[in-house]
Image (cartoon, rainbow, N blue to C red):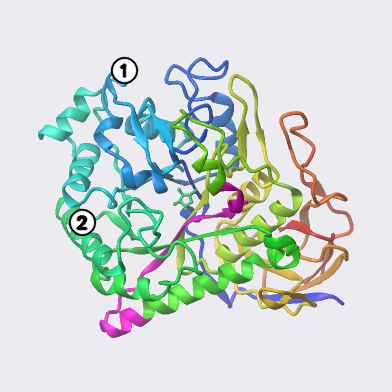
Amino acid sequence: RTARFTLDPAFTVGTVDPRLFGSFVEHLGRCVYTGVFEPGHPTADADGIRGDVLDLVRELGVTAVRYPGGNFVSGYRWEDSVGPAEERPRRLDLAWRSTETNRFGLSEYISFLRKIGPQAEPMMALNLGTRGVAEALQLQEYANHPGGTALSDLRVRHGDKDPFGIRLWCLGNEMDGPWQTGHKTAAEYGRIAAETARAMRQIDPGVQLVACGSSGRSMPTFAEWEATVLQETYDLVDHISLHAYYEPLDGDVDSFLASAVDMETFIEDVVATCDHVGARLKSRKKINLSFDEWNVWYMSRTQEQVSALDWPEAPRLLEDNYSVMDAVVLGSLLIALLRHADRVTVACLAQLVNVIAPIMTEPGGPAWRQTTFFPFAQASKYGRGQVLDVRVDSPTYDTEKYGEADLLHATAVRGEDGTVTVFAVNRSRTEPLPLDVALNGLGPTSVVEHSVLADADPDARNTLAEPGRVVPHTAEGTTLDGGRLTAVLEPLSWNVIRLA
Ligand code: AHR
């Protein structure tokens, strides 16, 4: 059976915030060391930033880059990470049982972002686990105040005359999780988040603040946590965070392929909770969503790996090697974010390099694209503009976790120049899916390109030995005729159909 939907410019979801294509650099494993930063690497510049990685980061199209954690941030002492590199202290990183050298710190992070280009925006996480209001204010003053105070002048003495201009701040990380150093109840966290936010706004009323929501929809405190935190912080913050990671558990591939069903439900539940608190407070303000950690992550393997560590520097951790099937799921998660672009205005693919990442590196050796690189890069490049409201009429399949799920998952974005890009996933593992889209009152008259990520072997991957094994290819036979787009989506495929 054919899957169908209609596109009409009168029916839109909202405008895509560029920060929907954010990413995340945590001091974890080899994300920073031998990932982004490797002095002495043949492509490294004078600051130790790997040129081959920088090129791939630009091609990936990332915008906001969240830093320095993650769980790491709950032990982070910002003052350890500034000043002369050789004087910085080595510290135990409790989150990942590793040793942190602080060789890469705040100034290096900002300089890395500036090298990526103007599209890259800092998103700095604060330690509200083992620290509090005072340290947050010190960091804000050091980073953003132009000069003439002890901390801003210290930054200048450290070689950074220009303030860092950090606008977007996360008030802690996953504070609902018992694994978090300095874990808190919702009431405890709501108070410290509110007081930190209030004080930070005294320095700069224009800061944009993200309160911690739940670290997963399955957390026992989910929704109650958001309601309690927002009751305290509603007028003081702009966003609430969501985190979600997906993997096929117990071999349940069909549910894994429908992971975006869970992501969309999660988003809708958080929107409902935000709006409920807003109604209770009789507020006209809307809280937006920062989906600041999302990805496919074979997490069940991680705990064992971490507990076996004996405080190494930059160990190989969470280095998942992604298959074509993983990339199709990641594409579907991108579709879920775009479908909610009216309220999800920040999102960060966790993470950027080596650690559950689209970019991999070998120390002293090459950098390459994982399969998941392609859907992200294409969505960031072509998913800019107005998201059109897509209601699919699709054949379905059965999943253990989510019941009946559509085989087609899709969205469409209309650019400022009138072009339209359809992003679509066929979840069927065995069958091609015919697609029929009616275009009402839209300008495009032809298909520019139908790009597909699929493979006869859905387990195919890019590796150090074979870094170019998986790349997108062009589909033949896709047509746009008299306002009717027709295509056939290969089994288990990610599709980008560009119309002009
Ligand atoms: O991204 C890896 C980890 O996942 C982060 O440190 C933490 O916030 C989350 O649990």
Q: Which residues are magenta?
A: 276-302
Q: Residue 310 location in percent, x, y?
A: 46, 32
Q: Residue 298 location in percent, x, y?
A: 62, 51
- The residue where tag 1 is placed is 86
The mark found on residue 196 in the picture is: 2
Q: Quadrant of the N terminus?
A: bottom right
Amino acid type of disc 1?
A: Glu
Quarter where residue 8 is shown? bottom right
Amino acid type of disc 2?
A: Thr
Number of numbered discs present?
2
CA distance for labels 2 and 1: 32 Å
Callout 2: few (<14), some (14-19), or many (20+) C-alpha neighbours within 10 Å? many
Q: Nearer the viewer, mark 2 or mark 1?
A: 1
Residue occupying image coordinates x 65% and y 49%: 378
Quarter where residue 334 is shown? bottom right
> Is residue 142 positioned above or below 240 on the image?
above
Front position in the image: 96 or 419: 96
298 falls in the magenta region: yes
- Under tag 1, what secondary structure? helix
Q: Residue 140 location in percent, x, y?
A: 22, 44
- First in sequence, mark 2 or 1: give its number: 1
